[in-house]
Amino acid sequence: MMLIVLLLQVSLVNCVNITENTLKIKSLIMKYKNNRVHRSPMTSLDGFVQDALMFFDRTERFKDVLNVYNYSECVGDEGLMEKHVLKGLLVHEHLPRRHWHEYKAIHNKLYSSTHHEMAALIKWRQNLRRVARHNREYLAGIQSYSLHLNHFGDMHVTEYFGKVLKLIKAFPLFDPAEDHHKTAYRHNRRCKVPKRIDWRDQGFKPRREEQWQCGACYAFAVTHALQAQLYKRHGEWNELSPQQIVDCSIKDGNMGCDGGSLRGALRYAAREGLVMESHYPYVGKKGYCRYDSNLVRARPRRWATLPSGDEEAMEKALATVGPLAVAVNAAPFTFQLYRSGVYDDPFCVSWHLNHAMLLVGYTQDYWILLNWWGRNWGEDGYMRIRRGLNRCGVANMATYVEL
């Protein structure tokens, strides 16, 4: 009887809102388990409940399976179609033509001519085949992460690389704020740190921003690392201005939207200080420098780059100092079209760094990073990446700042 009641409750959950209702199903099963604790010895039903809970804890594929089989329900419903275009799991290569038109509308895609649109459609179809093939492997348990046709879905990987990935090698300019002794890290390196940490759980939840087709990742990474320090000290951060770094750090070796380095951005920020984004908003292109020293909100006292490739040092610094600006290799098409899960592409080599992100958390299995490609990329703008292999070179240039 208890099994019938449990299954009836599960069946009443509406499967349209996949993510939310996966949690509802898990909650129902957990409630049943808790009610059974002080009753009879374990039965076959209890074994079923335990196995179900282990399934939900160890895999995230259940909601994705439902996403696949729910696709037909969204036809004719504009809201559900948008949800599927933005978040649905694609496993079929032959989607109807309307999916392309929905993709263009939702991502505000405009093309200068019919020829350019046809070229984009061809690239979109090519990416669809790769995404569908990969996601079938994801559902089969072969891959640990899924892909999607996000706003980069109509780009060939070489076009994406040329337009978006602009982190450059820094000029070796002297910076008095650079701490070559890595004082804060060395002071804390013998401290015991938790097995997992997520600065979002501690209240640091910056706005998910989008760099557009401006190579400003270096500016976003440095401003967000400083915002994290403001939050750690004062309990608030007030978004700092990446546009200021884009416009004003030319003599530090940066090139505006054509790229820049973490070192150059930190050198500029330590010398001049940064104003709030409300005073100097981001526009996605380089302009004239409008810096006003009277409006400075934060200035790094010192900064340091951790030993290259040392993930243990990265864990210590993240737990004790705060979120870190990191450089990664974002060149693989799997990174370009990442949707969810623990990213673990062996072709994402560690020696080719071309993009900057913010490291905000870790578990024993993965790192958690914030990107600047909007909420519809990855997991609400975040990414999880396999830990222990220096995947994508995530530990090669991890840098912390101090106020």
Image (tube, helix red, strand yellow):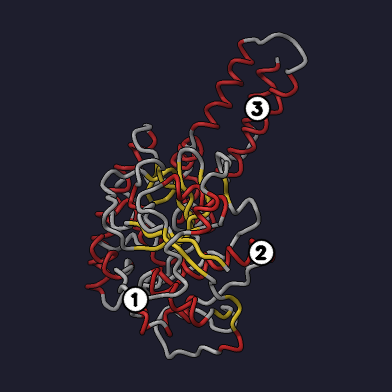
Instruction: Give, as a three-letter code, the residue at label 1.
Output: Leu
Q: Residue at x 57, y 41 (%)?
A: 192
Dot 2, crowdedness within 10 Å: few (<14), some or many (≥20)?
Answer: few
Give x and y (percent) for residue 383: 45, 52
Q: Is residue 194 above or below residue 213?
A: above
Report the side of 73 relative to 311 (left or right): right
Q: Locate the C terminus and report the quarter of the image it occupies.
A: bottom right
Report the side of 308 relative to 299 (left or right): left
Asked if the residue under mark 1 is in contact with the one under mark 2, i.e. CB atoms within 8 Å, the reply is: no
Q: Residue at x 50, y 53 (%)?
A: 186
Dot 1, crowdedness within 10 Å: few (<14), some or many (≥20)?
Answer: few
The secondary structure type at the circle numbered 1 is: loop
Give x and y (percent) for residue 100: 35, 60
Asked if the residue under mark 1 is in contact with the one under mark 3, i.e. CB atoms within 8 Å, the reply is: no
> Which of the two discs, 2 and 1, sits closer to the camera?
1
> Which of the two discs, 3 and 1, sits closer to the camera?
1
Give x and y (percent) for residue 366: 45, 43
Pick the residue in front: 205 or 42: 205
Report the side of 349 relative to 213 (left or right): left
Dot 3, crowdedness within 10 Å: few (<14), some or many (≥20)?
Answer: many
In this figure, which residue is indicated by the disc labeled 1? Answer: 173
In this figure, which residue is indicated by the disc labeled 3? Answer: 29
Pick the residue in front: 308 or 58: 308
Residues at marks 3 and 1, CA–CA distance in whole angstroms? 59 Å
In this figure, which residue is indicated by the disc labeled 2? Answer: 233
